[in-house]
Amino acid sequence: MRMDYYQIDKALDLLEKAQPNFEAVPKVNRYKVEQFFMDRIEDPKTFIGVNKDVTAILILEVGHDYFSTAQSIRDIVFYSETTGSGFRLLKEAKQWVEAWGDSVHAAYFGTSLSNGATDKMLERTGLVKIGTQFKFKLGDS
């Protein structure tokens, strides 16, 4: 489900717990992340999904492609500490991605924390592996 304002504190706690899993990333700054959430929680170009108990989080954002003027969707963070929650968030996010239709040319999902089990989960969700990233299938892509 899309995150609501009352879930922000739990989401901040979850990201702080997840911090050791992210290599080469500065320490989570609660104030900056809270501002990110407040600025984007209702932004239609940002998907901030959490499960009911806020033990899983997925953030996707629409932005301009680095090498063209077209829009693309990229992941900002994906973390789950409960089995199955990440899969359900990905299924919900896939609907959000598909709703963008032809207005985005690609939707990528990074796998820097990936392992065999994560790869299989992403493939079960319908993503296609390209190198170290996965791509949501859009239209005929």
Image (cartoon, rainbow, N blue to C red):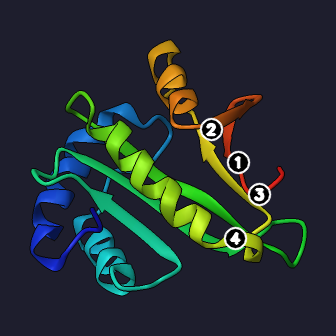
Q: Is residue 40 positioned above or below 62 on the image?
A: below
Task: Return the disc, 4 or 3, that comes first in the chain's sequence.
Answer: 4
Considering depth in this image, is 132 or 36 the residue closer to the camera?
A: 132
Q: Residues within 10 Å of mark 1 (few under 14, many from 20)?
A: some
Residue most extreme to the top: 116
Do the numbered discs 4 and 3 sit on residues whose CB atoms are within 8 Å?
Answer: yes
- Callout 2 secondary element: strand
Query: For residue 107, what is the image quadrant?
Result: bottom right
10 Å crowding of disc 3: few (<14), some (14-19), many (20+): few
* Occupied quadrant, residue 117: top left
First-in-chain label (1 vs 4): 4
Residue 111 screen position, x and y as percent: 57, 34
Q: Which SS class for mark 3?
A: loop
Q: Is residue 61 above or below residue 12?
A: below
Question: Which residue is rendered at x = 21% and y = 52% of the image?
Answer: 51
Q: Amino acid at mark 1?
A: Lys
Label 4 vs 2, first from the N-terminus: 4
Q: What residue did someone put label 1 on?
A: 137
